[in-house]
Amino acid sequence: MKLVKIASLLLLLSGCVQYSSPDRRTWSMYLKGASFSDMTEMARVAKRPVYLGAGGKLVPSEVESDAQLSYGDKVTNDNLVARQYMSTLEYELYDALRKPGISVQRAGTDVVVILVRDAIMELNVADISSTGDDTLKIIAKILKKYDATFMEIAGYTDAMRDKTAAGALSLDMAERVGVHFAQHGINTARMFIVGRGSARPIAAQDDIGRLTNRRVEIRLAPAR
């Protein structure tokens, strides 16, 4: 009986432990297999053999196709299957992530999750917050279910005079998210990790807009 109580107490305490990113010197170990480049179509094609070799899956093989898709052009049918797969993924992410500072959007076939920095990271510390830990665990759980996807994890800052510092800060955010995902079972061969600094602002550069521009975007593309 005492052992059961002790085990229950340890489980409770483990759930209360504040998440902290591992030592930066170990990040390369966690992110082994990830690509540090933009997730272009050409990059996905080049990465495909590595991805498949690491246990990656393709959308057509993961979806039970409708009987009518047995006929007609294969490319057209594969595109339809991919759209259906990504649509289901989009709705599941949307339903699970109804939180301030988080949005789920569609970009063609791809799905983009936008995480404002303050929604996932500590206010004055370069690390993931307890709330961010919970959010990223939810995303990781869904991404493990929809594992026939490549993902680009891109960090952004607000406008900064020092472009080098902006690039470093944005990459730091993206890498922290990538490490967190790797810790929670996401295949790193799916990952493209980039820091884009203050490029591609999505809001004005006023006080409120700056908070929105500091963000991490997770772009998901069907693997096929």
Image (cartoon, rainbow, N blue to C red):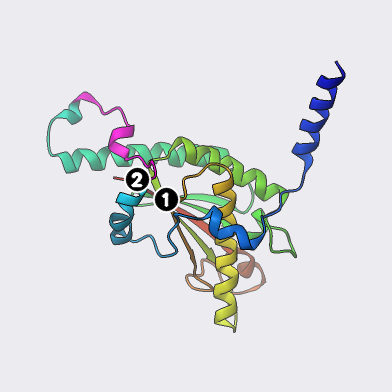
Residue at the disc numbered 2? 53
Does residue 63 appear anywhere in the picture?
A: yes
Is there CB contact under 8 Å for labels 1 and 2? yes
- Decide which of 77, 8 is in the foreground and name it: 8
Residue placed under numbered mark 1 in the picture: 189
Question: What segment is highlighted magenta in the picture?
Answer: 54-67
Q: Is residue 155 magenta?
A: no
Q: Residue 3, how many percent across, how many down?
A: 83, 21
Q: Nearer the viewer, residue 88 or 7?
A: 7
**What residue type is disc 1 on?**
Ala
* Mark 1 or mark 2, earlier in chain: 2
The quadrant where residue 9 appears: top right
Instruction: Say which residue appears at 81% left-offset and 20% top-offset.
Output: 4
Where is residue 2 drawn, in percent x and y?
Answer: 87, 19
Residue 196 screen position, x and y as percent: 49, 70
Horizontal and vertical percent for residue 125? Answer: 73, 63
